[in-house]
Amino acid sequence: MLPMVHIAGLVIGLLNPLAQGATVVILPKFEPLEFLQAVQKYRVFLQQYTLILPNAHVLALAKKKSQT
């Protein structure tokens, strides 16, 4: 969830998973509902070190999850 213009986002979020043979799902922007739908649709397996979320995104996900 780091922006790919940030070196950590590019390496941790894109290049490292691809180098390990993983599939990477990229969304155009962060929308809590779309994020949760993509996780479900693509059966995303979130490893602890590959999902780095800013606190604001965690809060948005928690609010969206409680509304569903």
Image (spheres, rainbow, N blue to C red):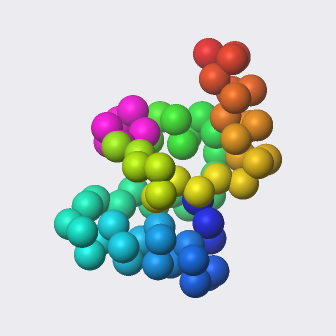
Q: How many marks?
A: 0
- Residue 19 lies left or right of residue 10; in this view the side is left
Find residue 62 and report its horizontal and vertical position in percent. Answer: 70, 29
Residue drawn at x 69%, y 17% is 66
Q: Please report the bounds of the magenta region as a residue range.
A: 39-44
Q: From the image, which quarter does the C terminus lie in? A: top right
Find residue 23 and report its horizontal and vertical position in percent. Answer: 28, 59
| Picture layout, residue 14 above or below residue 33 | below
| Picture layout, residue 35 above or below residue 53 | above
- Residue 10 lies left or right of residue 21; in this view the side is right
Q: From the image, which quarter does the N terminus lie in? A: bottom right
Specify the farthest residue to the left: 21
Residue 35 lies in quadrant: top right
Residue drawn at x 20%, y 66% is 21
Residue drawn at x 42%, y 71% is 14
Find residue 65 and report its horizontal and vertical position in percent. Answer: 63, 23
- Residue 5 lies left or right of residue 36; in this view the side is right
Residue drawn at x 64%, y 39% is 32
